[in-house]
């Protein structure tokens, strides 16, 4: 049994994703636990989330600070703001939004600890392939739960 923690950051979008994921996990016998900013903070700082879950899904790299001893799969499922950041054609802003403050300031520690980055459209993946080729292999385009296309 795989135990997954899924952080709901933006209720409308993430609830759609979570409802689909719950059905999939129930049918496979795996466990999906849903959380939010309050429960994520409690689980990280007080309970020790790394001791229970096999996979953790957060919306940003920065949420993984404090997970140094975690041995499971770290997944970033970006919010829509990542598409806007890529469209701005501002490399410094995009680096910050994609990989967080530490990466923008030169530290790759947290960005490299992520095992899978999930983005809504191919524009983001193409941008990463062009500008961050060393991390591009970890990016997957999954489509958007409120749209039919993957731009």
Image: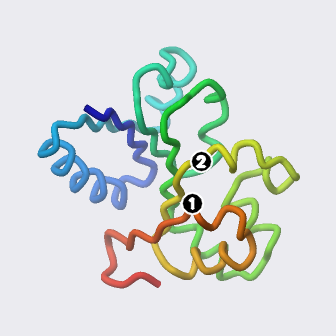
Quadrant of the drawing holding the N terminus: top left
Q: Position of residue 113 (x, y in %)?
A: 64, 43
In the rendered image of this protein, does residue 78 appear above or below residue 51?
A: below
In the rendered image of this protein, does residue 19 appear above or below residue 67?
A: below
Crowding at dot 2, Cα within 10 Å, few <14 / some 14-19 / many 20+, comes out as some
Colour basis: rainbow
Q: Position of residue 140 (x, y in %)?
A: 48, 67
Q: Secondary structure at mark 1?
A: helix
Q: Residue at x 25, y 51 (%)?
A: 21
The front one of 29 and 35 is 29
Q: Give the number of marks.
A: 2
Q: Position of residue 61 (x, y in %)?
A: 63, 48
| Mark pair 2, 1: CA separation | 8 Å
Q: CB atoms at circles 2 and 1 under 8 Å apart?
A: yes
The front one of 122 and 148 is 122
Crowding at dot 1, Cα within 10 Å, few <14 / some 14-19 / many 20+, comes out as some
Answer left or right for 28 relative to 111. Answer: left
Q: Which of disc 1 and disc 2 is earlier in sequence?
A: 2
Answer left or right for 113 relative to 8. Answer: right
Q: Residue at x 25, y 34 (%)?
A: 31
Please name the residue that numbered disc 1 is placed on. Answer: 138
Q: Secondary structure at mark 2?
A: loop
In the rendered image of this protein, does residue 31 appear above or below residue 78?
A: above
**Res 67 quadrant in image:** top right
Q: Position of residue 12 (x, y in %)?
A: 34, 59
Please name the residue that numbered disc 2 is placed on. Answer: 114
**Res 131 quadrant in image:** bottom right
**Res 136 quadrant in image:** bottom right
């Amino acid at each position: 049994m795989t135990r997954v923690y899924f952080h709901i950051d933006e209720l409308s979008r993430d609830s759609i994703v979570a409802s689909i994921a719950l059905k999939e996990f129930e049918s496979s016998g795996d466990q999906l636990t849903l959380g939010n900013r309050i429960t994520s903070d409690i689980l990280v700082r007080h309970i020790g989330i790394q001791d229970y879950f096999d996979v953790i899904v957060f919306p940003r790299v920065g949420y993984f600070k404090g997970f140094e001893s975690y041995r499971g799969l770290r997944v970033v499922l970006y919010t829509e703001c990542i598409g806007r950041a890529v469209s701005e054609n501002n490399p410094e802003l995009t680096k910050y939004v994609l990989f967080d403050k530490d990466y923008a300031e030169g530290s790759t520690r947290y960005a490299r600890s992520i095992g899978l980055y999930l983005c809504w459209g191919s524009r983001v993946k193409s941008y990463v392939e062009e500008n961050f080729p060393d991390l591009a292999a970890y990016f997957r385009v999954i489509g958007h739960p409120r749209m039919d296309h993957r731009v």
